[in-house]
Image (cartoon, helix red, strand yellow):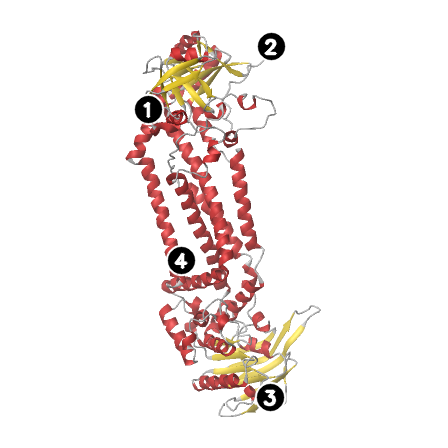
Amino acid sequence: MRRSDAFLLVLGLLALLLELAWVDAAERRAGPEGAAVRAAKLAMVRRLGLTDLCLFTEARYTRHPSQADRFAPFQDHPQALEHFPSGSLMAPPPLPELPADPAPSAP
Amino acid sequence: MSYIQLTDVRRVFHQGRPDELTAVDGVSLAIERGAITVLRGPSGSGKTSLLALIGGMARPTSGRIHLDGRELTSLPERFLTEVRRRTFGFVFQQFNLVRGLSALENVMLPAYPLGGSRAALVKHATALLESLGLGHRVRARADWLSGGEAQRVAIARALVNRPAVVIADEPTANLDSKLSQEFMRIAADLKSGGTTLVIASHDPLVHDAPVVDRTVAMRDGRLDGEGAARSRGSAA
Amino acid sequence: MSQDLAPRPVSSWLERQRSLLDFTLASLSRRTGKNLSLLAVYALVVFALASVLLLTESLRAEARAVLAGAPDVVVQRLSAGRHDLTPADRVEPLAAIRGVRGAVGRRWGYYFGRGSQANFTVMVPERFWGAEGEVVVGEGVARVRAAAPGAEFPLRGADGHYLHLTVREVIPATTASVTSDLVLLSDAAFGRLFGQPADRFTDVALTVPNAKEVATVAEKVTRLFPDARPITRQELTRTYEAVFDWRSGLTVVILSAAVLAFALVAWDKAAGLSAEERREIGILKAIGWETSDVLTVKLWEGAVVSLTAFGLGWLAAYGHLFLGGAPLFEPVLRGWSTLSPARRLVPAAGGLEVLTLFILTVVPYTVATVVPAWRAATTDPDAVMRS
């Protein structure tokens, strides 16, 4: 077999597998099983009033990042370095839009 | 006008620099169609540079070159390459085969960019190798070939695009007498098929061979008056 | 002679490409070992980058889909910059705010089991369906404590005494990504466990039916209770959009390592051609190849390695994450915790990541392969004759 034919065959195979992965992804995401699982999770979140995904269970502020205050990661010491691995994976939550301080009233 | 006409051709390397070298110094030469022309001369006489100019591999610093009435020197690069590709076949002194490729692939190499039918190319290249007695070594890797085999593969490669002119630079330099004579036999075959040959060689086996139509002596980049027009045979 | 210069039809263009590709592959296989290891490194880089991209997108999509059911506003109370309990008498005033349909006090906290060394999230759901002495646990908890329905589930209370609870049911693993570490129990059990006063909640969840009013409601909450901290659902989702942000620690490390590895690979190419390669190009020019032919071969050389590495790397990343359960990332994702949720990741939509990664890897590598050859490719062919 010509070298170029062999290579094009390999490439074609890779392309086919990537296509299959694409289809598989769509199936998992939007297929009946995927949709059912997502619906079950949504229902559970509503039922229990949950606010966070259970990604990391090692620290409070990585278990419930949306509820964490800015103090929590630095509770040991103001300059303490991050000691939980998951802390370096999660970026701190963005600061909420706080209302502006009122202008100082005239004396 | 002759088939290939060189008019007052000069080739200067590193012009204007301290290491300026004039390889070809005002050469005017006419190559007849269907003839075997041999350039004689010691090494450094400019034979190789002249061959490169004849075969369109380089442009002269000054002077003109005509091929079959058409002027080559003023052609743009792409057209020159195209003409060279289809008209000339080169056999190099070092053979210059590509290592790692088989003999057959080496022969087919000049035709790769032309995009012709692969099957036809394989057939033609195989036939060429067979006509040179290498039918059994078609698949052998170029690095494993003997000197004589490599030379014949180099010749086959030069012939794959059915060139009108074959140019050979010291083809027998690395061969024994038997293989040298074999080379001249192949040259005679090509000549009888209508191919024009231009050979540079200081080997007497080559330039004294009866099949040679004309020898041209070169020295220091110029044609040597002595023996310049020792023509023979029926070349016009 | 004019037929020499006739234009070439499409079929011959194809044939030309195939022939040049033949030559490229033969050229590459001359140094099989080196080129295979190059391919391996390249594929590994793609694997790492693709994995990060796929993982982060998957988690973000999950958060978007699932947390749509989270409370509209959660009102915390801050004291001295830290989270503090909310008095129960705040619930009514909060419910009375215009735009708020209902307010419910929530009770939840963390429990660290010294025996299992695992962190649980202990929670009282709005309507607990078990008896006072029962718990409903997530699948991760059940695994760590080897608990099954009917099993004993002791918890050490704040006063040092143990609460003896029984497992009523285990939440199925389908919802593991949100429930894996939960321990649900009754209000009374929560009070006995943590010793917190009955008139204190952890925070208050508000229901705001009109999404456009949420911001106003949040503002009103802070005006009503200056020490309150309202967290809207929009902020919730923004938190998860920032998950694995490329600026976060570990991701930067992975990305930097990948970029460096890639630069090394490209550097090897960009450093220039070896003498052998230059000789070969010279021969090609001498036997009649044009500059464009030589550059096409170089282009194919870059493309062959790039496309193969890209395909392999991407497939490996996908398979590893979504079909194989991401075993290589498990130690990183688990960290120091002993409880790791059962992960069944779902791929997110988006060919954009594939395209981005493709452009960021294939293009530079191909350029790094072609450009250094430019000089050699444009050299006069007679240089070979003179050598």
Same chain under badges 4 and 1? The reply is yes
Can you tell which of label 3 and label 2 is closer to the viewer? 3
Query: Image quadrant for the N terminus of chain C?
Result: bottom left
C-alpha separation, residue under disc 3 versus residue under disc 1: 102 Å
Q: Secondary structure at mark 2?
A: loop
Q: Is residue B12 above or below residue A60?
A: below
Please state which amino acid type lies under the numbered disc 2.
Ala
Q: Residue at x 58, y 21 (%)?
A: A76
Please state which amino acid type lies under the numbered disc 1.
Ala
Query: Which residue is denoted by mark 3 in the rendering?
Result: B228
The numbered mark at residue A43 is: 1
Please state which amino acid type lies under the numbered disc 4.
Phe
Q: Is residue C58 above or below residue C82?
A: below
* Residue in front for this viewpoint, C27 or C68: C27
**Toward which corner of the image does residue C201 lie, by quadrant?**
top left
Residue A86 in the image: state x and y as whole percent: 50, 30
The numbered mark at residue A106 is: 2
The numbered mark at residue C175 is: none
Q: Secondary structure at mark 1?
A: helix
Q: Is residue C216 visible?
A: no
Q: Residues within 10 Å of mark 2 (few under 14, many from 20)?
A: few
Can you tell which of label 3 and label 1 is closer to the viewer? 1
Residue B115 in the image: state x and y as whole percent: 40, 66
Same chain under badges 4 and 3? The reply is no
Same chain under badges 4 and 2? The reply is yes
Residue B162 in the image: state x and y as whole percent: 43, 77
Q: Residue at x 55, y 16 (%)?
A: C81
Circle nearer the N terminus (1, 2): 1
Do residues under tags 3 and 1 come within 8 Å of each other at their CB atoms? no
Q: Residues within 10 Å of mark 3 (few under 14, many from 20)?
A: some
Please state which amino acid type lies under the numbered disc 3.
Ala
Q: Chain of mark 1?
A: A
